[in-house]
Image (tube, rainbow, N blue to C red):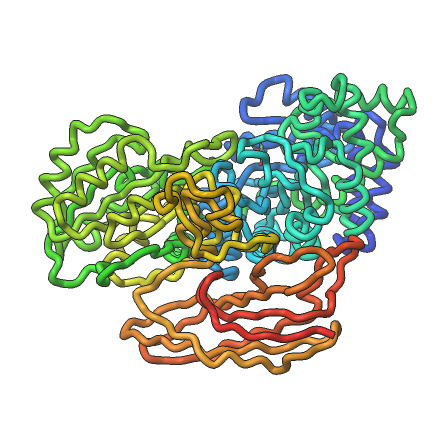
């Protein structure tokens, strides 16, 4: 490394005298801070977009005006910029290289909602480990994930990036991803700093329209939206990203209560708080700040360390300090958080990717993990007459529909670096893997999911008539989900529903493989199909995973992390709702049974829709298997515990089929009476078990009384004594029920 500056040499010397041991880090930070000008400090708080790097960006780096860059695609460029930072700036402080590495870097895993459907935290952790191995090979050390927004509205396109609607499941998945990226030791050059986003409540955006406002009261914030963040921070998550929404009128990026009182004071978070893209400046659009200077002032005083790309900090903080609207101490503390992360990542010691790095993207082990994750994410929603897996009597299969060969869409949203050329599509996989034993008759029929051109329907029907079974690959393109991609209707796009009707008319068994980023309203299509496999956007290895499942080499084990509504009008719809004062009896009168001119009160007064009833299409936690499992013998170690105790809940699960398989055993509780109304059910545990045909296993859950704690009437978290229902079951609607009390 060439070093032009004597001061730089002194700083390097000073830094190298210390190990990365934590106790010394604060001294090192202070040593650097004491050398920094105000301008250099403000530079550390500035993250710039390096997607289209130009001379201005390079100059800014050299002047010490940049603490981090985001969106660099090219490893040579990344190295070049890091070299500028460490050897051409006065103090040689390395850059934090950020990128959205969400569900894979090169080897793309299923979208996060699919990962959640695996109910397999080890596998999900492995997925983010693979992503980190591949991304750090080019020098990216900071990922902008995981997203842990509780998402109960499928209209919101970013539900695809979420772990679904449940607090417990989201928390487990978020922590698994954080651990996968950070690998318990950020100093390793193969570790990436994770970023818990979006803080907070972004998934509750009104009407499911992206960027919209939220209105989450503090109690709900604490009971539903904050827990995954708190758990991730406890697990060591290095950074947090603010959200775009205003909650109750306050944009998160300027919300001191969130960023200081909760994050720093209550949770003792000492990592970096970064704004979401341009969200400092967007506080002007919100009508929360009158100009960029005020936005910078409000954000830094609220506790936002790093400004992502808006440059409001760069443009105004120096002046704001001079005007005493922002104290230098506030700036110093923000810089400390950023330098601390740079130390934790050992960027001062090793700013570049070591030459010895031998990790290769798309390694066989990575592809195998991606295939397993895809396979475990698939949810079998229907399987009449055991249509799946295909029997050996099946000789000809018609492959119809736009998603059988859609490599780009298969990768899903936020797969910035995934490559079509490495993606294996279902049609290709089926022909290559099973072409020797069956004949495939392929007719894509529609170019893409929104295609309205029916001219190839004839060919599709012709192929279908020749086949023993039809497999229709339908769904939605990846661009219809993700950021800024909300939908008001969730029916299948284009003329896909019409295609299903035509295929159904052939009388041949009809299998739907649905590739989508969210729950779609597919009630009519499910009714027409013999079998339905929901495969989300399954990533690089989706094709082989689907092929093996259709032919029974693997057995479905995914469970829904989100409730599937029958109609959009039921949204937001989640299993863990409150009871209401007039709960549905599920025997309500529906539209077609209403007599003419009845009395106002003749239908009863319960909480349901006249046209949709009360039930979802499929409940949270639901998913079939080629095996069948029987639950019996629920046993509780006690039916009375104190608030300091725990109990053991056990049940026996038997595989009553002749097929080996995995089952996700789920534990739910209901707190019958609380100081506030409590959810009808809450997931408190799950275990994925493997049972050979005919085998049984007793599954044991330990439920601590503290697991039942929540923020009640007085807004403190505690376990309230009382009576509880408890279930061990196969989904949120079916289970063995017991009772216990807490005194
Ligand atoms: C998204 C974030 C993302 C950031 C950086 C924003 O538009 O909301 O989730 O990490 O861009 O790409």
Q: Position of residue 91 (x, y in %)?
A: 78, 32
The answer to which of 93 and 104 lies nearer the viewer is 104
Q: Identify whether 538 is placed above or below 659.
A: above
Q: Position of residue 66 (x, y in %)?
A: 70, 28
Q: Position of residue 234 (x, y in %)?
A: 70, 56
Tell me if I can see residue 539 in this picture: no
- In the image, what residue occupies the spot 36% across and 49% down? 535
Q: In this image, 265 relative to 639: left or right?
A: right
Q: Identify whether 386 is placed above or below 371.
A: below
Question: What quarter of the picture does the N terminus occupy?
Answer: top right
Q: How many marks?
A: 0
The answer to which of 695 and 292 lies nearer the viewer is 695
Question: What quarter of the picture does the C terminus occupy?
Answer: bottom right
Q: Identify whether 385 is placed above or below 404.
A: below
Q: In this image, 667 relative to 92: left or right?
A: left
Instruction: Give the quadrant of residue 11.
Output: top right
Ligand 1: image quarter: top right
Tell me if I can see residue 256 in this picture: yes
- In the image, what residue occupies the spot 89% across and 30% down? 327
Q: Position of residue 236 (x, y in %)?
A: 69, 54
The answer to which of 28 and 549 lies nearer the viewer is 549
- In the image, what residue occupies the spot 78% across and 19% down? 293
């Amino acid at each position: 490394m060439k070093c032009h500056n004597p001061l730089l040499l002194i700083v390097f010397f000073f830094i190298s005298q210390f190990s990365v041991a934590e106790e010394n880090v604060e001294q090192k930070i202070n040593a650097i801070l004491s050398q920094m000008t105000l301008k250099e400090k403000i530079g550390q708080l500035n993250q710039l977009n390096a997607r289209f790097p130009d001379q201005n960006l390079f100059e800014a780096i050299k002047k010490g005006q940049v603490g981090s860059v985001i969106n660099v695609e090219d490893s040579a460029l990344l190295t070049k910029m890091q070299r500028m930072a460490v050897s051409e700036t006065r103090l040689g402080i390395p850059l934090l290289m950020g990128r959205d590495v969400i569900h894979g870097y090169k080897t793309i895993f299923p979208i996060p909602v699919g990962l959640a459907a695996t109910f397999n935290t080890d596998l999900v952790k492995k997925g983010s480990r693979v992503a980190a191995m591949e991304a750090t090979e080019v020098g990216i050390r900071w990922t902008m994930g995981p997203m842990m927004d509780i998402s109960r509205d499928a209209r919101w396109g970013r539900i695809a990036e979420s772990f679904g609607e449940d607090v417990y499941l989201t928390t487990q998945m978020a922590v698994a991803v954080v651990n996968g990226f950070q690998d318990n030791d950020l100093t390793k050059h193969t570790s990436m700093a994770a970023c818990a986003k979006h803080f907070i409540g972004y998934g509750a955006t009104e009407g499911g329209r992206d960027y919209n406002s939220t209105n989450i009261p503090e109690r709900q914030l604490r009971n539903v939206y904050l827990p995954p963040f708190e758990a991730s921070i406890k697990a060591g998550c290095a950074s947090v990203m603010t959200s775009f929404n205003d909650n109750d009128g306050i944009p998160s990026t300027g919300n001191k209560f969130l960023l200081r009182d909760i994050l720093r004071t209550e949770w003792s978070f000492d990592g970096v708080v970064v704004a979401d893209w341009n969200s400092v400046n967007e506080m002007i659009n919100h009508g929360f700040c009158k100009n960029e200077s005020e936005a910078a002032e409000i954000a830094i005083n609220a506790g936002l360390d790093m400004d992502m790309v808006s440059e409001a900090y760069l443009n105004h903080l120096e002046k704001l300090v001079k005007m005493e609207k922002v104290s230098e101490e506030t700036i110093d503390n923000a810089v400390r958080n950023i330098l601390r992360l740079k130390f934790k990542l050992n960027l001062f010691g090793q700013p570049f990717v070591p030459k010895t790095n031998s990790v290769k993207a798309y390694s066989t082990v990575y592809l195998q993990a991606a295939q397993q994750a895809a396979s475990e994410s698939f949810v079998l929603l229907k399987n009449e007459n055991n249509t799946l897996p295909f029997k050996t009597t099946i000789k000809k299969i018609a492959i119809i529909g736009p998603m059988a060969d859609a490599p780009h869409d298969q990768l899903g949203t936020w797969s910035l670096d995934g490559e079509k050329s490495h993606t294996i599509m279902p049609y290709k996989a089926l022909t290559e893997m099973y072409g020797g034993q069956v004949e495939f008759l392929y007719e894509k029929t529609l170019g893409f999911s929104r295609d309205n051109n029916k001219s190839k329907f004839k060919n599709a029907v012709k192929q279908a008539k020749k086949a023993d079974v039809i497999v229709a690959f339908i769904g939605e393109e990846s661009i219809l989900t993700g950021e800024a991609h909300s939908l008001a209707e969730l029916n299948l796009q284009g003329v896909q529903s019409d295609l299903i009707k035509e295929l159904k008319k052939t009388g041949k068994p009809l299998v739907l493989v649905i590739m989508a980023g969210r729950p779609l309203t597919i009630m009519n299509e499910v009714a027409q199909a013999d079998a339905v496999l929901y495969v989300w956007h399954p990533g690089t290895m989706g094709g082989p995973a689907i092929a093996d499942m259709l032919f029974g080499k693997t057995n479905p084990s995914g469970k829904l992390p989100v409730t599937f509504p029958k109609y959009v009008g039921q949204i937001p719809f989640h299993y863990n709702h409150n009871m209401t004062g007039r709960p549905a009896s599920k025997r309500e009168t529906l539209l077609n049974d209403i007599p003419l001119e009845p009395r106002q009160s003749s239908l009863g007064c319960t909480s349901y829709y006249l046209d949709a009833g009360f039930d979802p299409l499929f409940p949270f936690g639901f998913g079939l298997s080629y095996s069948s499992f029987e639950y019996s013998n629920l046993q509780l170690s006690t039916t009375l515990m104190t608030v300091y105790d725990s109990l053991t809940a056990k049940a026996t699960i038997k595989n009553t089929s002749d097929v080996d398989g995995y089952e996700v055993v789920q534990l739910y509780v209901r707190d019958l009476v609380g100081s506030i109304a409590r959810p009808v059910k809450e997931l408190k545990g799950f275990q994925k078990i493997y049972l050979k045909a005919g085998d049984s296993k007793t599954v044991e859950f330990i439920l601590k009384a503290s697991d039942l704690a929540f923020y009640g009437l007085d807004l403190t978290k505690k376990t309230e004594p009382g009576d509880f229902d408890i279930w061990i079951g196969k989904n949120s609607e079916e289970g063995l029920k017991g009772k216990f009390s807490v005194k």
